[in-house]
């Protein structure tokens, strides 16, 4: 029995020794092939290096550096063997590397480059997300934000653009915050997040990095949220900062006010239009009509004087002048104004009606009587 026990012990010890010897041999082989691989890689003997790293991984599939360098070597061979062959092989090796360490920086960086090259934007973004978790930096965050934006993932893009704007950082992206804020405003607007878009637009203007385009966008956003008064104020600001186009901004004020039933703002818009373009007789006529409708004939007269000074032949203004003169009791002056307005075919009938209202046309009976009595008088004079 003792002999049997000793025999078993000897067998076990021998197996352990052989196992230890085998582990030592494998470890030695790994070290050897890693050395061979490194030397070949440094000498740019890519094929030999690939063979050695492949052998290392056969001995030890969890060798992170071997998996990474194998992927890198396949990537380096893309020009000689062709990207269609090399890049898929590189990807397999690098995916093995991140299966060992999902946040391995260099593997994820290279995978990002490969996915970008083959147009797999979503996988490129995933690799870049891992890079940022391992080592946050502004340049890569900007790349990731742009990737999401171009891919239509606005919500994800917004997260990273906001991080770039808000973070205290040394800017390495080569762009100003103004560009990022503009992008954020547009993205929120595309998502229908009007309040957020308006917040970023206001930040642009308040920070002195917004211009006419941003102010015009603010007008539209304010109208969408129902802030009509705010829209008026921004349009007035636009009329000041972009004076060459002031007429269009005042016109917009008048149009919005008309839709809203806001007389005071409508008139403010009309007055601005005339100030921007004194030849705008149509707006002057509307102002005259507004004052006449309120019984403010003195104010109406002032606007008529301004309009007729620019164009004394304007038929519409002449008609309105006649109306004003009628209210002042000057029928002769009114008829003279109406007669002058008749020169414009578009207003001829209206002007004639105004005259007939003051001097009704003769009826047939009145005409016959005039002719009859006029004839008798002529006969008496001859006798």
Image (spheres, rainbow, N blue to C red):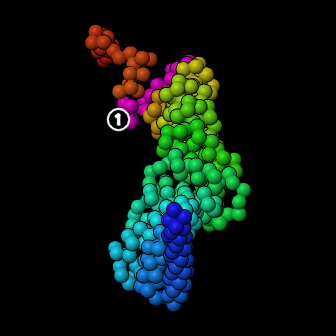
Magenta stretch encompasses residue 329: yes
Camera-side residue of 334 and 203: 203
Main SS class of the magenta portion in the image: helix
Task: Name the outermost residue toward the bottom.
Answer: 43
Q: Is residue 312 above or below residue 132?
A: above
Q: Is residue 262 above or below residue 233?
A: above
Residues shaded magenta: 321-348
Measuring from the top left, give residue 340's x and y in whole percent.
44, 33
| Res. 353 image quadrant | top left
Q: Is residue 98 visible?
A: no
| Res. 233 image quadrant | top right
Q: Is residue 85 left or right of residue 166?
A: left
| Residue position for label 1 | 345
Q: Which residue shows up at 30% across the image and 12% down it?
A: 363
Magenta stretch encompasses residue 89: no
Camera-side residue of 195 and 318: 195
Q: Which residue shows up at 39% across the image and 36% down it?
A: 343
Q: Is residue 153 visible?
A: yes
Measuring from the top left, give residue 362's x and y in whole percent.
33, 15
Q: Is residue 279 above or below residue 135?
A: above
Measuring from the top left, give residue 145's x and y in whole percent.
54, 56
Q: Quadrant of the C terminus?
A: top left
* Local crowd size for mark 1, using a 10 Å CA cut-off: few (<14), some (14–19), many (≥20): few
Measuring from the top left, give residue 292's x and y in whole percent.
55, 22
Q: Is residue 236 left or right of residue 356?
A: right
Camera-side residue of 20 and 209: 20
Q: Which residue shows up at 48% across the image and 44% down it?
A: 190
Camera-side residue of 325 and 101: 101
Q: Is residue 271 above or below residue 20?
A: above
Q: Which residue shows up at 44% across the image and 56% down it?
A: 122
């Amino acid at each position: 029995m003792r002999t049997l026990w000793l025999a078993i012990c000897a067998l076990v010890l021998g197996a352990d020794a052989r196992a230890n010897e085998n582990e030592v041999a494998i470890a030695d082989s790994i070290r050897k092939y890693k050395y061979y691989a490194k030397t070949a890689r440094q000498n740019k003997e890519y094929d030999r290096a690939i063979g050695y790293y492949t052998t290392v991984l056969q001995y030890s599939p969890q060798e992170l550096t071997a998996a990474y360098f194998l992927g890198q070597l396949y990537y380096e061979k893309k020009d000689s063997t062709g990207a269609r062959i090399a890049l898929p092989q590189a990807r397999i090796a690098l995916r093995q590397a991140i299966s060992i360490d999902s946040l391995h920086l260099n593997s994820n960086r290279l995978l990002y480059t490969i996915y970008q090259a083959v147009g797999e934007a979503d996988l490129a973004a995933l690799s870049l997300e891992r890079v940022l978790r391992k080592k946050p930096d502004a340049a890569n965050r900007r790349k990731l934000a742009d990737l999401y934006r171009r891919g239509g993932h606005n919500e994800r893009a917004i997260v990273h653009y906001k991080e770039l704007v808000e973070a205290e950082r040394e800017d390495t992206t080569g762009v100003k915050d103004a560009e990022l804020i503009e992008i954020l405003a547009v993205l929120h607007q595309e998502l229908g997040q009007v309040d957020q878009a308006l917040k970023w637009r206001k930040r642009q203007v308040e920070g002195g990095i917004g211009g006419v385009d941003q102010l015009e966008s603010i007008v539209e956003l304010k109208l969408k949220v129902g802030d009509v008064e705010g829209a008026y104020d921004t349009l007035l600001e636009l009329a000041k900062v972009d004076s060459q186009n002031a007429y269009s901004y005042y016109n917009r004020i008048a149009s919005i006010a008309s839709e809203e039933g806001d007389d005071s703002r409508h008139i403010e818009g009309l007055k601005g239009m005339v100030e921007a373009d004194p030849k705008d007789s149509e707006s002057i006529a509307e102002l005259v009509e507004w004052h006449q409708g309120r019984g403010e004939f003195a104010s109406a007269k002032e606007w008529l004087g301004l309009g007729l000074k620019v164009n004394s032949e304007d038929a519409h203004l002449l008609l309105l002048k006649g109306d004003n003169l009628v209210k002042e009791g000057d029928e002769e002056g009114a008829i003279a104004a109406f007669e002058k307005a008749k020169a414009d075919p578009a207003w001829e009938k209206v002007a004639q009606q105004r005259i007939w209202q003051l001097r009704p046309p003769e009826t047939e009976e009145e005409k016959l009587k005039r002719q009859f009595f006029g004839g008798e008088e002529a006969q008496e004079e001859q006798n």
